[in-house]
Amino acid sequence: MGKNPLAAKLKNYKAGISMVSRSGLPMRHRLFGFFLAFLLLVMAGVLAVLYASGIFKTGYMENYAYLDRELNETAESLSRDYSTITVHTVELAQTLSRNLEGECLERGIPAQTLGEHPEELEGILKGQFSHLTSALERTKSSGVFLILDATINPRLESARYSRGGLLIKNMEPNVVSSSFAHLRFLRGPMSVAKENKMQVLPQWRMEFMVENLEGYALTIQNARGSSLPLSRLYLWCHGKMIGSDSEAAMYCFAPLVDSLGNVLGVCGFEVSSMLFKLTYTPQNTKYSNLFYLFSPWENNHILAEEPLLAGSSRPCQLSGDPFAVKAEKKFALYKQEGCPTFAGLHETISLYPRDSVYKEKWALALVMPEGELAEIVTGQNKQLSLFLLALVCISIAISAIVSRRYVKPVVSALDAIKTEKLSGETKTKIPEIDDLISYLAQQDEVTPDPPLSEGREEKGPLLRQFEINISSLSAAERSVFDLYMKGCTAQEIAGTLFLSINTIKTHNKRIYEKLNISSRKELMLYIQMLEESREKKNNRS
């Protein structure tokens, strides 16, 4: 039978498969890496599109738009409400100024000498009671007051800072009513309350103590000698009118000036902390610690001494230190010594006309703890990030499954080639592989393996390489190899060398690696070829 080059090449290929498989990455790993790289590239493209479209800023902008709209609506409502109170204050001041001047004329007292006639003050105050209660019923405020620049009892040690007047509180400040049922008497002669059958509050006092009432002194001071109308002389002030243990409030002061320019006192309305909270508390369920802060604004600071607060929850105890305002992109940070940092928005509000005596501005800030706002703003991004991470994990799983299932039939076909178990019925459902298997199976059927004696000349280089490789064996490996040369089995070699069968297997593995063979069958083939070659050589000699 002639030589078959194709069969020889196939034999050489099968003999070298084990050596080649030990280097480089397996096909399945390569395919997995390809799929994974492709899917990650697609994911990177999706991220780039999302970032370019601003989807990651959506939560930030939505929260900013909501809070900005909430702040603007409240600022407009507050400006409108305070403008209304201002108008009522000026109207009340004009009415009381005329009435006080008329009362003084009827009693034969010059208006400028009102302080020298304390015995007349109680009767004068009684005449103003109805005007005060009527104005309070028409105005959405928590109280109305009248303070004369005079005292009923000048002989008291505190007379210097004691001033006669009236203060009537509205216990339902968010309701405009024509009934006196919810009005309470807090300052003024007790006879006025009894005559009008009005309930007196426990904090009642005869007169006002104006020593620390800044709005009273400042209003009178700026009104004296001024030619401006009352609509330019009113003052908005915050603080506590009836004592340090009372709640903070805002007061609109207007001077009482007669026709000759004499300042007789002040009057105005009160906006208490409770009224401010009832009116301006944010109505939402998204922000649990959102609240308004209303206080004077000065040099990029919010003065936090007795501010008005409105919110569903009260922040930490605020100190009298101002809030330093620092702009951060859309939102601003509000820092006060001893308190956590707040974040939010603010808007400055002017409560005076341009030609007013007073230029003070106020700030309405809508704030919450900085950490809460950051968590809300980034919440949507966290959800999106978790979704993208889930997609990455799914991509890895799909890559692993697809690469494994795709490579499995190819690996099975290669295993069949290595074990020489080829048949035309072996199918991988991959056309190229199936064609190769069919071709190799046909070649095996048409061209059987040549006998060992045939084709020995073509294997001469392999035999020479085999002899060279024998010299690389160690002494122990050579002992095992020599016994194989004599035809001994592994069990016989173990008994001869007094070694365990596992040790013999270890030597076999190393011998196979160094001789570049894959089985004992192949080893015995080379040994037979080597012996025959030596016999031919001896015969020739």
Image (cartoon, grey):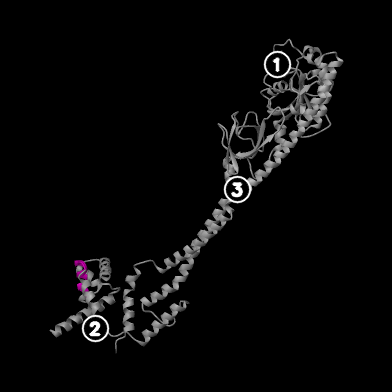
Quickly name the residue at label 2.
457
- Percent x, y of residue 214: 68, 23
Q: Residues within 10 Å of mark 2 (few under 14, many from 20)?
A: few
The range drawn in magenta is 473-484
Of residues 497 and 181, the one drawn nearer to the viewer in this rendering? 181
Q: Residue furthest right?
A: 106
Q: Amino acid at mark 3?
A: Tyr
Q: Residue furthest left?
A: 541
**To which quarter of the image does residue 484 belong?**
bottom left
Of residues 352 and 209, the one drawn nearer to the viewer in this rendering? 352
- Label 2 vs label 1: CA separation? 132 Å
Secondary structure type for disc 1:
loop
C-beta proximity under 8 Å, tags 2 and 1? no
C-beta proximity under 8 Å, tags 3 and 2? no
Q: Amino acid at mark 2?
A: Glu
Q: Main secondary structure of the magenta part?
A: helix
Quickly name the residue at label 1.
161
Quickly name the residue at label 3.
60
Secondary structure type for disc 2:
loop
* Residue at 60%, 49% in the rendered image: 59
Q: Is residue 314 visible from the viewing direction of this image?
A: yes
**Dot placed on the residue nearer the N-terminal end, 2 or 1:** 1
